[in-house]
Amino acid sequence: MLRFAILGTLLLFLPGCVYFRLLDVKSQLKEVERYFAVERNAAGMEIGFLDPTLRDDDLERLGVVPLRSETTEDGEVWEVEMRKRLPAEKEPEPEHHVWTELRFEEGLLVSVLIPDQYLACFPPDLILATMKALGDSRVLKLKKSVAAQTEQSFDEVLEAATYEQLLETFGAPYKIEKDEDEMALVYSYEKGEPEDLAEERRSDRTYEIRYILDPAGDRLLAAGTKSISIRYPSP
């Protein structure tokens, strides 16, 4: 969800001020109802920051680059895209690039859009529960890097994605790993960058998302990146 736009970049090197603003956001996640507003619309689910903290240049330091941006009466809108990677022998799937929309007012991030097509795998109740779990996560700062880890369980069992839903929403994974206890769908992405971006600002970094399911693929058990993991409760 948010992970492809912001959270998957948490291991980048950060100046101290950005680190502390990230801690502030983490603190807000402990009280989702107080600090965030959720609105469903035709585009999907928009998560609004009621007490915005992160700045547009913070996100740039985190490695978030808008594929397109638009100036509006209220501020600025970024379209952020993660481009799906597949092994060389497979046909590209540009229709399964992952995207989100970020809105800024006076340079502060005020909302993040979860596009409608992703809500089949991650319904709103599950997204909100995930946000709360991240609020209780541990954040580490070592040599100017920050990482968040959580294995929080939720108080109630929520609807979670199946193997078929993940394939329908995100297409074929980069690879599949299996053992007798679980199945992992591993997706690989690179940042979508505007064509006119200066060469020195371009990145060759790739990002890996892992979805862990039961062996039959009937239920999502965990999801995460290198820096963040969420484990969901079993029925």
Image (tube, rainbow, N blue to C red):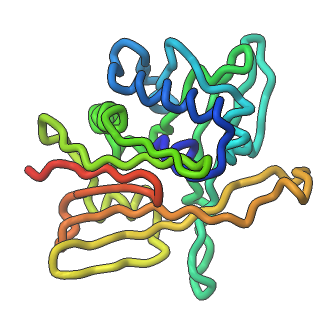
State which quarter of the image contains the N terminus.
Answer: top left
Question: Whole-percent x and y of residue 121?
Answer: 34, 49
Q: Residue at x 91, y 53 (%)?
A: 198
Q: Within the image, what quadrant is residue 27 found in? A: top left
Q: Within the image, what quadrant is residue 32 found in? A: top left
Q: Residue at x 43, y 42 (%)?
A: 139
Tag count: 0
Residue 227 appears left or right of 145: left
Residue 38 appears left or right of 110: left
Q: Within the image, what quadrant is residue 182 found in? A: bottom left
Q: Residue furthest bottom?
A: 89
Q: Nearer the viewer, residue 232 or 217?
A: 232
Question: Whole-percent x and y of residue 131?
Answer: 36, 34
Question: Whole-percent x and y of residue 157?
Answer: 13, 41
Q: Residue at x 58, y 20 (%)?
A: 53
Question: Whole-percent x and y of residue 104?
Answer: 68, 22
